[in-house]
Amino acid sequence: MPAALCSTIQLNCSEPNQPALLKALGPVFNLSAIRPVLNTSTTTNVRTFFTLYGILGVDEKAQLLNTFIWLNYWWDNEFATWDPVQCGISKISLPRKKFWVPDIVINEFMDENTAPPVPYVYLYSDGRVHDAKPVKIVSSCNLDIYTFPFDIQNCTLTFNSYIHYAFDIKIFLGRAADEITKRSKRVMTTMGEWELMEITANKVVSEEIDNGIYTDKLQFHIRVRRRATLYVVNLLIPSCFLITVDLFSFLLPPQSVDRSSFKMTLILGYTVFLLIMNDLLPVTGNAIPLINVFFSLCLALMVTSLLETILITNLLCGSADFSPIPHWVRVLVLQTMGSLVLLPQQTKKPKDSDLKISTVAAKGDADEKPPGVENKAVQQLRSLSKDLQAIRQQVEQQLKGSQSSEEWIQVGFIIDRLLFGLYIIFISVSFITIIIIWVNSYGR
């Protein structure tokens, strides 16, 4: 008998076939209620690993990860060993209920296992028991969706005995984590929008309860990454198109085009777009996703653009009714801001018609002659000169009245161009910041 089996019970088969082995295992079945060790101080070492067959989905609102795995357990049964030559077989499949099975649970399990049951286990001639079964796991997972849809989730599955302590049952990793990851990627058939990155494992530092009693745990960390193509095409690209259209709407001439109606239509269309695409956005109470900040920023920029258009339109259309422009506004806006946006203050030059009127009037006065020598042509010229002087006075009064209006209109153009520049800078900085956060998150 090998040295490794000195502490086990050796079964004897009357014939080298399965019925004889099954008959010899009869006493072992009667011991299925107790842990299969001859000495209670002996620890049962359970080796475990799994293959991730499918990622069924992630529930952001409930913070749940749905997966389907093939789970494997190995442990030793000291009550059942035999000589494979004498019994004619090295392993046999038997009903699970006839053996003691370790009470290994997954701490993060949140729902019933709906996978089909497997009623059999394999028993080997050296006493090893192999338990393999499919498990549909609905596990709790602390999801971080701040960088949605470029988020990477790290969920944990913790295996430990529910009632036994570490001096009874210890759990060990049955296969290297790299092999588990490679096999899972090779056989995985259902991932949906999620891509498996890696699976790692580690033993948890045992938690001492009291009097030296502690538990033994094994943790698997499943790292998955969301496929963001769907969200980029359906959410981000249309938003960028709409905000670009709103940006270029600043190029429309506000004095001849109803720019406010155009911007209002954009805001209405963007609101309808967000309502339609609302089902694609995650719902959670832990954090606000960055994409929601992106949408809110786009909507806020559109509303700000509309308010700016209303202000400019009011300046252009109602400038005739405004009081003369204050000195500080003239200095701050017309001179300082105007130079900044390349719209310097325009100086008003006298028109040629005014000069001609003045010249004709002055000439008419200079050519006045005594009434006895003036002829009919000179009288008509004098009368025309007086009419031109009256017209000139009226024109000057209108020009003085419209000078304030022109200054207010120029203030409107300067503010419009200044806000257009600030709009471009704010959009560029905000979008570049958000993109950097997403790229750094997705590349981890």
Image (tube, helix red, strand yellow):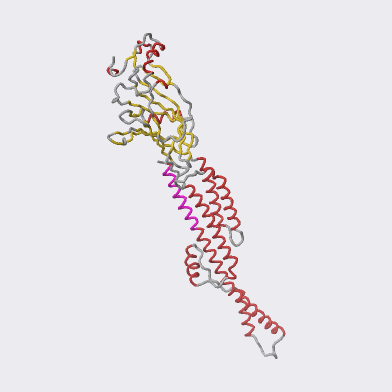
User: As drawn, which residue projects farthest toward the top?
Assistant: 15
Q: Percent position (x, y) of residue 66? A: 47, 35
Q: Percent position (x, y) of residue 83? A: 34, 13
Within the image, what quadrant is residue 254 found in?
bottom right
Which quadrant would the N terminus be assigned to in this image? top left
Q: Which residues are magenta?
A: 421-441
Residue 193 or residue 327, whichever sits in front: 193
Within the image, what quadrant is residue 72 found in?
top left
Above-or-below relation of 358 to 170: below
Q: Is residue 155 magenta?
A: no
332 relative to 10 in the view: left or right: right
Count of labels in the image: 0
Which quadrant would the C terminus be assigned to in this image? top left
Residue 150 or residue 102, whichever sits in front: 102
Q: Percent position (x, y) of residue 370? A: 67, 90
Above-or-below relation of 430 to 143: below
181 relative to 366 in the view: left or right: left
Main secondary-structure element of the magenta-colored stretch: helix
Residue 324 or residue 273, whichever sits in front: 273
14 relative to 282 in the view: left or right: left
Residue 290 or residue 93, whichever sits in front: 93
Q: Percent position (x, y) of residue 349? A: 56, 72
Above-or-below relation of 114 to 403: above
Within the image, what quadrant is residue 259 found in?
bottom right
Q: Residue at x 50, y 40 (%)?
A: 229
Q: Is residue 429 magenta?
A: yes
